[in-house]
Image (tube, helix red, strand yellow):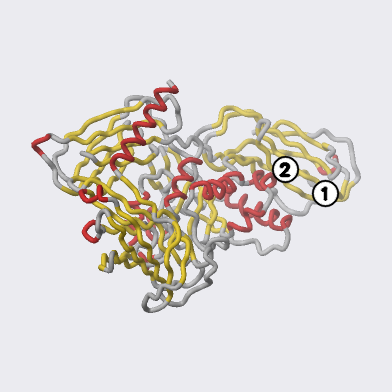
Amino acid sequence: MRRLSLFLLQLFVCASLGAQEVIDLTGSWDFSVGDSAIYNDFVQLPGTMLSNGKGEQTERLWYRRSIYVPAGWNERHVSLFLERPSAETSVKVNGMNVGSSQNRFTAHKYDVTKFLIFGQRNLIEVSTPSTKGSWQGISGRMELRAQPRNLYIERVKLTPYPFQGLLQIDLQLTGRINYLNSEVVEVLMQRADVDSAAIVNRYFPLNGRQLKFMMPFSNEVAIWDEFFPHLYRIGISVGNDYYETTFGMHETMMSHHQPVLNGHDIFLRGVVKDDKFPKTGCPPTDVESWLETFRACKDRGLNLMRFMGYCPPEAAFAAADKLGFYLQPDIPAAQGEEINRVIEAYYHHPSFLMMGSEYYPDSIRPAIQPIPSSGKDNDNLRLSYYKHEVEASLLSDDNAGFELQDFAEVCRLPVKQWHLFCSSVVPLVRFPKADFTAADTLRVPVEVYNAMNGDISPIRAAYYITNEQQQVLAGGEISKKGIPLGKHVELGSIMVPFNTIPGPQKLALTVTLGNKIANRWEFTSPKNVPQQSELVSEPN
């Protein structure tokens, strides 16, 4: 089976390379600043003014490079691909104007076929206006791409229907169709995360430049979510052209301000990431950098990142797909034309959960509670603040989740303590008051926040109270039952008379679920005279 898997992988790769040839444009480029270009400097692209040590520029930026284009490309359609320019670009090839692009968050693509001289060196010139800040330049892939000129794939849209076992494929082609040859669309599909996964191969008749058809699954569909991020690879072949990508089988909708994924509610534990990247000046375009970022979030129990005022590059979506992490691009209203381009470019990524909230009508807007920066001056105080705010959100009926506003501050805090109160399953208590007397009995209702992908089988819930010396002063079982998906799942209550505990002293109440899930709260017992009394645990 391993040999078969390797063969199928080679089939995908060889078909892709055969259809689209690429010339890498990364490296040293002539550089100029001003209203017109006088090239007397150079920079490394992809790169920014910050990464090239140029500082912030206030005038137009110019880049130029000479590149050899093989004679064998003279029968190909050739495009210039710039993944992530910092602003509008204008392009010239061999001194002739090709055009301009104002895409902010998607790639700039130019048809340069008629401007090239094949079999010779060609001069490519790109210019951009100045932008405020250190994100000035071009990042990501920079390539010349060759496709078949007669017939090639221009656009692919994938729409999954996981519970019907179908994938809808919307295909847009450009060029001439030879109906006499009865050309067809061939689709190859395979699980991406299983070495021994079988390949599904289907053929569909080519009857126009715009096609819509359903691709059936031969086996049970593997669903994508944050707990089981199963991915599929798909290859689409038309004539001599080939397209390949990954996707996840998932279904998202909104119900009463609550996001629903694959038929069940999802509860969002998010964080906001601004567009400040001090080291490079621009968002990273490599998958590994985003994997590191999203792992830091998942380690702290978070499952969503909102990008305030921008959309991340393709690599962010690819990394989030792999980890099972939700993304929310947030495009300003003034850049509304970019919405369709962003959806077209990244819609097939299952991690693309939703767009910025200003684009949702009130009737379907998810209710997310913002939690601002703590403003505290040490980590202990910051953890007392975030624990209180996060737990208040988990205990609330008025939201579908929360959104931390300070990514940098959150990632500085220790993972172990943070994970107690921010996770997909969190024990919670409701202290009736802050100050107690010796005559009081501590009565604490206990509940669970269950944001897993379904119900939890019967599990033992217990509690214990310890002092600063870690001595256990009280404890017992609360309940042993299943926990349905949702908020406010009542487990029972804890009842401990204060006259059984010497005071005053600092105490900690810990509630556990099984052996791995726990949460902890500190409080102070009142001054009293200890008396012998039986400790009571009241199951629900």
Residue furthest out toward the bottom: 35
> How far from the left and from the top, in percent, is residue 178?
11, 40
Residue furthest out toward the left: 180
> How far from the left and from the top, in percent, is residue 348?
36, 45
Residue at image location 59% in from the left, 45% down from the top:
301
Q: Is disc 2 surrounded by few (<14), some (14 to 19) or many (20+) residues within 10 Å?
A: some
Foreground disc of the pair 1, 2: 1
Residue at image location 66% in from the left, 46% down from the top:
415
Residue 506 — which label? 1
Q: Which residue is mark 2?
A: 443
Closer to the camera, 232 or 480? Answer: 232
Closer to the camera, 199 or 91? Answer: 91
SS category of the residue bearing label 2: strand
Q: Is disc 1 surrounded by few (<14), some (14 to 19) or many (20+) residues within 10 Å?
A: some
- Amino acid type at circle 2 is Arg
Horizontally, is 458 left or right of 465 in the view?
A: left
State whether residue 257 is above or below residue 219: below
Closer to the camera, 500 or 149? Answer: 149
